[in-house]
Image: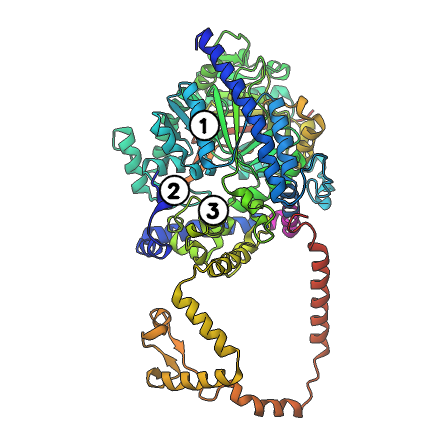
Amino acid sequence: MSGSETAAKTVKERAKEALRNDFLRQAVRFTTDRLRNARLQAAGEQGNWEAWRERGRQIRSHTIAHLDYYLNRFAENARANGAHVHFAESAEEAVRIVLAIAERKGARMVAKSKSMVTEELHLNRALENIGVKPVETDLGEYIVQLAGETPSHLIIPSIHKNRRQTADLLSKEAGEELPTDTPALAAFVRRRMREVFLAADIGMTGCNFAIAETGSIVVFENEGNARMVSTLPKTQITLMGMERIIPTWADLEVMATLLPRSATGQRLTVYMSGISGPRRPGDGDGPEELHIVIVDNGRSLQLGDPEFQELLNCIRCGACLNVCPVYRHIGGHAYGGTYTGPIGAVLKPAFRKNVAEWDDVADASSLCGACAEACPVKIPLHDMLVALRRRKVEAGRAKRPEALAMRAYAAVMGSAGRLKGALRLGRMAVKPIARDGFIRARIGPLAGWTRHRVFPAPAAEPFRERWTGLRLELEREPAAMDPAVRRRLEEALRRRQAEKREGGDERHGG
Amino acid sequence: MSGMADEAYREWLAGLDAESRRRQQAFLDALAAKLGRPRVTEPPPHPFRGAPDFWKEYELSPEERIERFIANFRASGGHAFRVSGLAEAARFIADKALELGVPAVIRQDEPVLAGLGLESLLPGVEVRVWNEDPAEDWIARAAGAGMGVVLADFAVAHTASIVTLSARGKGRSVSLLPPALAAVIPAGRLFTRLGEVLSRFDETGREGLPAGVHFISGPSRSADIENDLTIGVHGPGIVYALIVDA
């Protein structure tokens, strides 16, 4: 795994690199379009999508608001099922626990199914360091691992790799030239992975949901590799973000309705597996020993924070990536962290205690709100991005020119006289460079804009100066509102007030 | 591991568990502190349990359920058929096994599946029963079989899912390792919604759950190579769902 999270480069530099890669841009656009359209179609087919989203939000918010209760319940029930449960406050602790188990077991190979938490912990590197071979068995994750890279999309990790690159990577592994057609490549991976599943000492999985009332872990997947690693190796280790909890199996129906549809547009992933403890006496397969490592690693910093607690509602579907105009242009690696897209832009800084480490990822957003609209559990991601920017400024970490500009803006806008003077100055200043009402010159503070588009020149007679005349005109003909328009407006206002009354509960985990 | 190493390992594991219990209290206390209140130890009222109310009222007739399951299962790339009885199901499975030229078939240890009489329908094919002899390596047997045959414990029409619960005679490998899978679904076990099956696990409770509950909704698939759909990358690529009229 490349340590891209510590890369010294800025988001801007990484984005520039991505923008030069034509394949990447086309592939990301194509795939995100496909996933987004599939989501919209699936949501439409299911019907009442807003009611499902609202229920999803309610269940997640309720669980997070009582996380200590439900986590305790989960741990006790999982132990009663025969699992070994571990609590890790930090990434280091989680890694220490996993390595200790691997060492005690004398493990040589770990077969892994997809787990973003293990990416977050850089667990593969840690395993390699003690001589244990981690093998990613999800097709996309395997490709990314062979390339020595990190996933660039939550659902399609190898979105940035083309067929030729994939064939080259797999051919090198096969020791022979493989054809580039998908069936041939997939057949090679199937054969190779069968050996891995059967030979691995430890199977490692992530966890989409954990059911408090029965101590069960639930994994969603399409390929079957997560079932393999939780069926064949003698020891299973499951890494779980501490917020993955839901109270009951009944609640799983809501998550199972929201997650696959939002991720890929499927009615359900091909496999949904509920695992309750190790194999039972007499069972012929399943792990003999099951470890569940519950990881905090910065998650608890969001608890009790009214602006960010809902971040823990996230079910990792990737819908926000697929609609984000920024992600669609620069892809996942430009974000420089484990999690990418809008959710990554918030998770990365939010999971870190140290303000000084805040990256500029929160700036990689147009604040258009498409992410929040797509989110199946209604996380207000764009509000969080604004809050992050505000905190950055409050902590005195904004760029100096930006801070100066904002102060100047406040001074000008604070006084009508100053604004009038400034506008007059502005009109005079741009006169020499304005042509036909537009500015094209790439100079001064305008260059950032005019490099890619034209800027409209200020009006010869600004609105503020025309207002006196306009007001007289308005007063002459008293505005009688069209009764139909008035009715519509009043109706809209009533609806909004009613929504406010209903929707306000539990939002910040009451 | 040798006996003594085994003993040492168990001791170490017990130490780890004890440490985990100590850590758990501090971990959960810290969460409660961040939430700005004392630890919650009584079950909190959970007014939003499960699906929205309108959905809980949604129910298809038995005929509609069968039609919906078949349509949705086919849309997911699986093969679904309605058969008039177990005899027809048996003939269907035997025909497919011959067509695929499988060397061996492995089935769950279920009386209904024994009643199919696959052994006599497939004279040249080895038909094995999961875990019938504990001395054998059953994972290897399943990996070597060309087809797995299971009896669905439940099925869901809306998501076109086959549900199998693990047990001594019902290995998870049977529905996972062979390249082809055939599932026999008694029509009476086919429900409309996912929630009807899931809520049963709440009712059964922890003590009643098996180690593995598996929802299978079509053939194994991946789109990780340039969005090109690949079938059967790890799990079975061919899946037959046979709904048997009771």
Does A387 sit left or right of A360 as displayed?
right
Name of the residue lying farthest toward the left: A176
Question: Which label was assigned to residue A453?
Answer: none
Say what amino acid the circle numbered 3 marks: Arg
User: Which secondary structure type mostly characterizes the magenta part of the structure?
Assistant: helix
Secondary structure at badge 2 equals loop
Report the Cα–Cα distance between label 3 and label 2: 27 Å
* Spatial CA span between label 1 and label 3: 22 Å
**Chain label for disc 3:** A
Q: Secondary structure at mark 1?
A: helix
Q: Which numbered disc, 1 or 2, marks the residue that appears first in the sequence?
A: 1
* Lower position in the chain sequence, tag 1 or tag 3: 1
Q: Residue A158 got which mark?
A: 2
User: Which residue carries the number 3 mark?
Assistant: A352
Q: Position of residue A378 (x, y in %)?
A: 59, 51
Q: Is the residue at mark 1 from the same chain as the one at mark 2?
A: yes
Viewer-side residue, B240 vs A145:
A145
In which quarter of the view is residue A108 placed?
Answer: top left
Query: On screen, A390 above or below A145?
Result: below
The residue tagged 1 is A98
* Magenta-colored span: A44-56
Who comes first in sequence, dot 3 or dot 2? 2
**Three-letter amino acid code of the residue under disc 2:** Ser
Mark 2 surroundings: few (<14), some (14-19) or many (≥20) residues within 10 A: many
Element class at badge 3: loop
